[in-house]
Image (tube, rainbow, N blue to C red):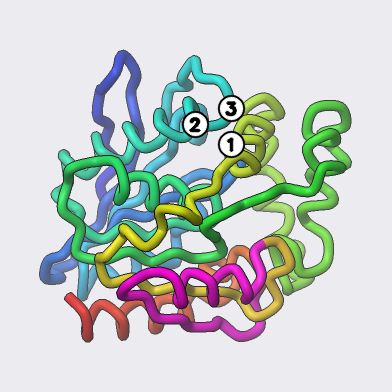
């Protein structure tokens, strides 16, 4: 595993990459709101088949923050982070969870860089956020964190190792960045454009995900020209953490067939 950085737009973006002899294409994983690249630790196991990278978006993990308002400005800055790592690693498969899925879809729509495939996990073409949660993120961050770690939100499991680790990542990102993330999700809506993303796509959903339920992923499969649907059992929003073997198997099967 190699940890590296790339400088762009006056800031430094941190990423990790593992190549255990896998063939191209390289996968780049993009975390969700208030997260960091550690959310993808289980996916580095794919590196014997496909090189795998994951990044910290601006203001998350070890990456510099960016001065950007929530909404499209922040989302576009996150896309710039992804572009910089793509150019360094040659990645051509984007795997995005939640906010990371919005980043991946915006990349596919707006940047003139060829992709071999997308994996959109726990995300949607529109990502409205509960108004109460938006208010708690600004006024009562502890309550927001507790809500997000309630039953079948981020996790289906009650294993405290997952829950406490995820809470800590959110506190590490901090209230300002996490609120910016969720508010950027709240304004994200590409339903009028989703049919322009024509690369092979896998919409991957945890069966218990209440934040971005099955219907969000069925919409992607129905509206995108080349999108298939798969479900991860016994998982909620962060299926890649809860059920890494099943998640990886779904991704590998899809890539083996389609790229």
Q: Which quadrant is the C terminus positioned in?
A: bottom left
How far apart, in angstroms, are the residues tagged by discs 3 and 2?
Answer: 7 Å
Kindly identify which residue carries mark 1.
Answer: 184
Q: Within the magenta stretch, is there residue 218?
A: yes
Q: Earlier in the sequence, mark 1 or mark 3?
A: 3
Q: Earlier in the sequence, mark 1 or mark 2?
A: 2
Q: Which mark is residue 70?
A: 3
- Across and down, in percent, residue 57 comes to 44, 36
Q: Which mark is residue 237?
A: none
Instruction: State the extent of the magenta-drawn residues as a range.
Output: 212-235
Q: Within the magenta stretch, is there residue 68?
A: no
Left or right, residue 109 beside residue 96: left
Query: In the figure, 56 relative to 66: above or below?
Result: below
**Helix, strand, or loop for circle 2?**
helix
Query: In the figure, 205 relative to 169: above or below?
Result: below
- Circles 1, 3 touching at the beta carbon (< 8 Å): yes
Residue 25 lies in what quarter of the image? Answer: bottom left
- Across and down, in percent, residue 100 comes to 47, 50
Kindly identify which residue carries mark 2.
Answer: 72
Q: Nearer the viewer, residue 101 or 148?
A: 101
**Helix, strand, or loop for circle 1?**
helix
Q: Nearer the viewer, residue 257 or 18?
A: 257
How far apart, in angstroms, are the residues tagged by discs 1 and 2?
Answer: 7 Å
Residue 15 lies in what quarter of the image? Answer: top left
- Regarding residue 161, the answer to whether it shows in the image is no
């Amino acid at each position: 595993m190699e940890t590296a950085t790339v400088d762009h737009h006056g800031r430094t973006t941190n990423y990790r990459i593992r190549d255990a002899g896998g063939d191209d294409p390289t996968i780049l994983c993009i975390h969700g709101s208030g997260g960091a690249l550690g959310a993808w630790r289980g996916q580095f196991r794919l590196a014997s088949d496909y090189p795998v990278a994951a990044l910290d978006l601006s203001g998350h993990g070890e990456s510099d923050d960016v001065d950007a308002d929530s909404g499209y400005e922040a989302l576009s800055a996150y896309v710039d982070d992804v572009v910089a790592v793509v150019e360094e690693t040659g990645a051509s498969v984007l795997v995005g969870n939640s906010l990371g899925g919005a980043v991946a879809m915006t990349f596919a729509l707006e940047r003139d860089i060829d992709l071999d495939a997308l994996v959109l996990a726990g995300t949607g073409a529109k990502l409205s956020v509960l108004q109460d949660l938006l208010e708690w993120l600004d006024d009562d961050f502890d309550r927001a964190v507790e809500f997000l770690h309630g039953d079948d939100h981020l996790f289906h499991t009650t294993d405290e190792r997952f829950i406490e680790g995820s809470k800590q990542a959110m506190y590490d990102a901090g209230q300002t960045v996490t609120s910016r993330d969720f508010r950027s999700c709240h304004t994200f809506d590409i339903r009028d454009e989703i049919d322009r993303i024509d690369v092979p796509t896998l919409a991957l959903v945890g069966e218990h995900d209440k934040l971005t339920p099955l219907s969000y992923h069925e919409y992607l499969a129905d509206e995108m020209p080349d999108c298939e649907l798969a479900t991860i059992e016994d998982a909620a929003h962060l299926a890649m953490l809860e059920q890494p073997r099943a998640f990886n198997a779904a991704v590998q099967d899809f890539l083996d067939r389609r790229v």
